[in-house]
Amino acid sequence: MHIVIIGAGIVGTMTAYYLVQKGVQVTMIDRHEKAGTAASRANASLLCYGQKSPLGTPDIWRKIPTVLLGRDPRIKIQKYFSPTLYFWLAGLLKNSVSDRYRLNYLYLSELVENSRELMEEIIAKHNPSFDHRRNGRLNLYPDAAALEKGKAHISLYAERFDIDFSILSAEQCIEKIPSMKDRKAPLAGGIFTPLDASGNCEKFIDEIIENYLIPSGLFHFMPHTDAQRLVVKNGMIEGLMTDKDALVADHFVLCNGAWASEFLRPYQIYLPVYPVKGYHIQCDMPDGVSLEPNVMDTYSNTVAMQLENRLKLSTGFIFNGFNADVPKKYLVNLKTAAQEIFPNLSLQNITVNKGFRPYTPDSLPIVKPSQKIRNLSYNLGHSMLGWTLAPSTGKQCAEQIAHFYGLPP
Ligand SMILES: Cc1cc2nc3c(=O)[nH]c(=O)nc-3n(C[C@H](O)[C@H](O)[C@H](O)COP(=O)(O)OP(=O)(O)OC[C@H]3O[C@@H](n4cnc5c(N)ncnc54)[C@H](O)[C@@H]3O)c2cc1C
């Protein structure tokens, strides 16, 4: 059996990983030169096993005026005249109602926990080198009310999923991260979850492809190959037209992240995946300084973490279609936030990266067979947690396909 995977990010790679384990011949294509160069390269590198949340929280309603006035530090809407975006935002609001939010959070937590177990299996089996650190995560809160809300949020599922957490005072937070000693931004305390981890997603993809997929003899990667059109007849794909050759296979899996909706539109298939831009800067870590837990500063909405000898700072939920620009003032704001968190760090040798999160209104991935085209499956829409979730959804997608074709489990 031969399967073509469209899109070689972390999701395509994990889908290939689990399909090859079932003895399936896999061809994975990507329009880029290398796998893992879109959102999978741009991400903040966090494996969010402890602290996570769907974007649509019940208090999102209160944020609407601030967002519409452009005053939210993190969420920016720049493309106001877009019916696709309005439709998507309506879905987001629908999913922010308490009951829906709880269900989404519960399902997300299940996927995350499953992914964590699978990632441990992968590490035990292949020992990939990807700067993996089981270093925990510290969420910082500027005032007592925000800290209390954070506590209520994590308590919702902490017991059910055995998530250990501790509430730290401002002094205890600074003890954990001494480079925050002269912090100017307000700090009431923090929530620390030891379960959270981090790692270089792009490096992980390279390792899985080079050390497992290629040696399996069942896998072929086609870089610089743009999937342009499906040739569909009687509800079946007969071939995939690319800018190079036409590809024929028994089954196709769409793992093209933020580009899924536009790819499927010609077939009257509408999946609510919107490209939500995010960005990060990286700079050198000064000698003698290290950042042990990953940090989420809820005051500036900035994630800070250490990747080898570099400090990585990420933020931004920008709604502006596929416009890839990151205005200079946003980068200046990010640098200011970094200096507020770590006042004694000088930001040297800065690089910038950005990417489009494939966002769904409920922040949950879409992993299912197409209802319209029999030999097509979707594994996409991983929103802000694709690096964390990819093992779980890759396995789920491979199992659905195996079940459909009666392959051995
Ligand atoms: C700033 C930022 C921070 C983030 N932080 C985190 C984090 O800390 N933890 C976490 O778990 N997640 C995080 N995420 C989310 C995570 O990165 C994404 O959910 C994940 O990378 C999605 O993976 P993907 O494989 O679906 O998409 P992508 O990595 O975008 O891959 C899709 C691939 O499809 C290819 N493609 C698209 N269309 C075609 C076509 N027609 N033909 C051929 N190829 C095509 C693209 O070239 C691309 O390589 C973050 C994302 C961003 C942007």
Image (tube, grey):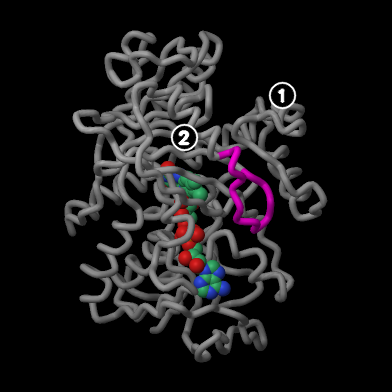
The reply, left or right, for residue 232 in relation to residue 190 is right
Residue stretch in magenta: 318-330
**Which residue appears at 55% of the width and 10% of the height?**
145
Residue wearing tag 1: 62
Which of the 4 image quarters holds residue 47?
top left
Q: Nearer the viewer, residue 121 or 292?
A: 292
Q: Position of residue 37 (x, y in %)?
A: 43, 62
139 above or below 37?
above
Q: Is residue 180 above or below residue 273?
A: above
Q: Does the magenta portion include 319?
A: yes
Tell me which amino acid carries mark 2.
Answer: Lys
- The quarter of the image holding the N terminus is bottom left
Q: Establish whether ligand 1 lies closer than 8 Å to the Cβ of label 2.
A: no
Q: Residue at x 31, y 78 (%)?
A: 219
Q: Which residue is mark 2?
A: 52
* Mark 2 Cα-neighbour bin, 10 Å: few <14, some 14–19, many ≥20: some
N-term mark: 1 or 2: 2
* CB-based contact (under 8 Å), mark 1 and mark 2: no
Q: Is residue 242 visible?
A: yes
Relative side of 266 to 229, left or right: right
